[in-house]
Image (cartoon, grey):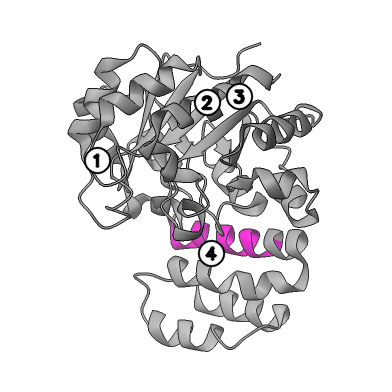
Amino acid sequence: MKKIDFSQPLVVLAPLAGYTDLPFRAVVKKFGADLTISEMISSNALVYNSAKTLKMIEKSEAEDPYFVQIAGNKPELIRDAVEILNDMDGIDGIDLNCGCPAPKVFNHGSGSNLLGDLKKLELILSTVQKYSKKTYTSAKVRIGVNEKIPVDIAKAVEACGVDFMSVHGRTRAGAYKAPVDYDAIKLMKESVSIPVIANGDIKDYAKAQEVLTYTHANGVMIGRGAIGKPWIFYQIKHGIDDADISNELKREIILEHFDATLKFHGLHGAVMFRKLLHSYSKGYTGATEFRDIINHISDADVMRDMIENFF
């Protein structure tokens, strides 16, 4: 049974390494994200049975539908990784990362490196499509490595028989700083018959509507815009702005997120949560001093008290 309905624009959580772990995905699901995707999983690490990698694949009960995103550059390893995922329940789709700009991923031949060799991209993505027994196959791409070749990329992805693609409207060289090219996303949408999800600098309801109207995309994917603001999914779906989210609700969500992080990651979760508190505290009076203090706290009880008192 198909779980994704493209008749209405989707609001999707982007996979973000170091952020979109199970606790975070559970929080955004509470606010109505239509689809959640794991952090990027190395096909090598999965095949070699990394315990850390297997933990990254775990999902919360609320995540339905749920995708696992994999990265890799060798067809045989990708095949083996897909076959491992086939044996895991609760995964509705496999997404291939063809967009990560990080040097260690790019230099390994994975992520956005595939955009520089579309024949290789097709080989890897077709391998996922061929061996996956999950309901969906998708790909996350950018619009090129150094030069923009959006239509070529879109057609290469579509040729592999995937169900949809998500597009970050920057080149690999553009990283996260260059202006997002929504014209390129629009061109990609016009050049293929499969659904296209738009991604890049969508941080509120107004921007989401503007991008959907302009590109005619089948949905928006939110990544960095959800860090410190997981309620953005509710805002986009219901057309409201930040003023409508009370400080009481924010405090409740931050504490819930903190407790879930400790439960999932153990006591080290307190240290991991520091970067999230940096984002959650934006706009609050005394945020700079608060960040300076929590940067030196690793005791979970002390940090929880700090959160309760500050927010």
The answer to whether the residue labelled 1 contacts the one labelled 4, judged by CB atoms less than 8 Å apart, is no
Query: Please, is residue 165 above or below residue 194 in the view?
Result: below
**Looking at the rendered structure, which numbered label has been put on residue 127?**
3
Measured in 3D between alpha carbons, the distance from the residue under mark 1 to the one under mark 3, in whole angstroms, is 38 Å
Residue beneath disc 1: 206
Residue 255, magenta (yes or no): yes
Measured in 3D between alpha carbons, the distance from the residue under mark 1 to the one under mark 4, in whole angstroms, is 25 Å
Q: Where does the image place residue 259, in percent across and percent down from the top left?
A: 70, 63
Q: Amino acid at mark 4?
A: Arg
Query: Please, is residue 266 above or below residue 105 in the view?
Result: below
Say which residue appears at 43% left-offset and 27% top-offset.
Answer: 119
Measured in 3D between alpha carbons, the distance from the residue under mark 2 to the one under mark 1, in whole angstroms, is 38 Å
Q: Where does the image place residue 308, in percent across and percent down from the top left?
A: 59, 74
Q: Amino acid at mark 2?
A: Leu
SS assignment at label 2? helix
SS assignment at label 3? helix
Camera-side mark, 4 or 2: 2
Residue beneath disc 4: 251
SS assignment at label 1? helix
The answer to whether the residue labelled 3 contacts the one labelled 2, judged by CB atoms less than 8 Å apart, is yes
